[in-house]
Amino acid sequence: MSLFSSSHFGLPRLKPLSSKRSHIVSVLDIGSTKVVCMIGRLTPREESQILPNRTHNIEVIGIGHQRSRGIKTGVIADLDALENVVRLSVDAAERMAGLTVDSLIVNVSAGRLGSDIYTATIDLGGQEVEANDLKKVLSAACQQSLRQERAILHSLATGYSLDGERGIRDPLAMFGDELGVDMHVVTAERAALRNLELCINRAHLSVEGMVATPYASGLAALVDDEVELGCAAIDMGGGTTTISVFAEGKLVHTDAVSLGGHHVTTDLARGLSTRIEDAERLKVVHASALANSSEERELISIPSIGEDERDQPTQVPKALVSRIVRARVEETLELIRDRIQRSGFSPIVGKRVVLTGGASQLTGLPDVARRILARNVRIGRPMGVSGLPTAAKGPAFSTAVGLMIYPQVADMETHAAGGGLLSSLGGNNSRIGRVGQWLKESF
């Protein structure tokens, strides 16, 4: 199945969830460290003060995860290896849930995620704003973002203006001469999305929707006040660290750097001359991001790389392990700090930062992050989900849970440019793009 197969005609984007009925949602989080498949039952919920924007309760009924293979810093390096891991993860989740999956919502880390704001205005001639005017101005903003080699993942109207007055949330039925919109558009390289879909199709599954990794992990780890007042979620994965900035209930900025927990592990393996798996164990058991004077006196054993049974493990001060780890952690956080500063969203982030992802579990990391980012920092775990096994309740599973939450917010997105992923992958002038447009207008 290709991106241009008929399965995509009816799928310009995720269909909005009916708030009246239950849904089964299947998701796939493809990371550099692990691949996770989750199957969840979404049941309508009453409005409440806790997580008020959620329309459904989520109960995880199946989960499968495997160590990642064929992925390097978020990019597919070996299709066969990754396809095999995807099959195993989905198979385990299906067995646990007692049902089979044919399509999935999948995360996107590769393809050099782009995050841009486009502004468009249209003339109202003093009339009131109608639904058609909104469509027009959103379409005008979306058109600016269309690029031959890039596809639109998300397009969110972050705010409207009337006659130059900004900060209007919903201008419908208001009067004015000129209507403007600021549109946040998240894009990725088409080739990376094609390879991602190819891998999933080879496992005899189809893609129901694609979600940028930083968006998904932010949805899972942030509370509503943070999303409303302005906050950054920093997802520290194995191969990449992603940033998402939320304000006034919307995703307003994303970014990613190709550094993650696996880089810390390889630094240790090189610096201590030991195998990757031994370095990973040392990192988890002994390493700390904080300096501690008592570590100078404490010695730990480092298994040697050689096969020779007579090779004795070497003894090194625990402080050496932490020093190697700290250098890479500080470099990553300084890079994140500079990216937030350069993005222009630093004032919106304010003092609120939430760390999530598997690499955020390193001992002492929140304290180092507080110092380098000069902000309040907390560790974010996935919220508002039942049925997660204990092992999956930590920050490492935020992206998968965020993918499960995503269908509830998918209708906030504007696909005025002719149908989101379908048209942008098929190219707006292609036969596929035109058929997709006709289907949207006719049904």
Image (spheres, helix red, strand yellow):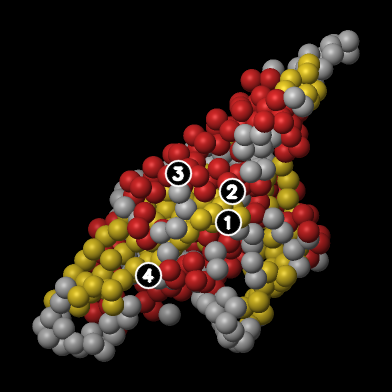
Q: Which mark is residue 336?
A: 3
| Residue contact between numbered discs 2 and 1, judged by CB atoms under 8 Å | yes
Mark 1 is surrounded, within 10 Å at the Cα level, by few (under 14), some (14 to 19) or many (20 or more) other residues, namely: some
- On screen, residue 373 versus residue 141, left or right, reads right
Q: Is residue 369 above or below residue 106?
A: above
For the residues marked 1 and 3, what is the alpha-carbon distance in whole angstroms? 16 Å
Write down the residue under mark 1: 378
The residue lying toward the viewer, choosing from 351 and 389, is 351
For the residues marked 4 and 1, what is the alpha-carbon distance in whole angstroms? 32 Å
Q: Which circle's residue, 4 or 1, is located before the other in the chain?
A: 1
SS for dot 2: helix
Residue 310, picture quadrant: top right
Q: Which circle's residue, 2 or 4, is located before the other in the chain?
A: 2
Q: Nearer the viewer, mark 2 or mark 4?
A: 2
| Residue contact between numbered discs 4 and 3, judged by CB atoms under 8 Å | no
Q: Nearer the viewer, mark 3 or mark 2?
A: 2
Q: Which mark is residue 44?
A: none
Write down the residue under mark 4: 414
Check disc 3 and give the amino acid type. Answer: Ile
The residue lying toward the viewer, choosing from 7 and 283, is 283
- Residue at 70 percent of width and 64 percent of height: 39
Residue 46 coordinates in the image, percent (x, y) = 62, 87
For the residues marked 2 and 4, what is the alpha-carbon distance in whole angstroms? 36 Å
Write down the residue under mark 2: 366
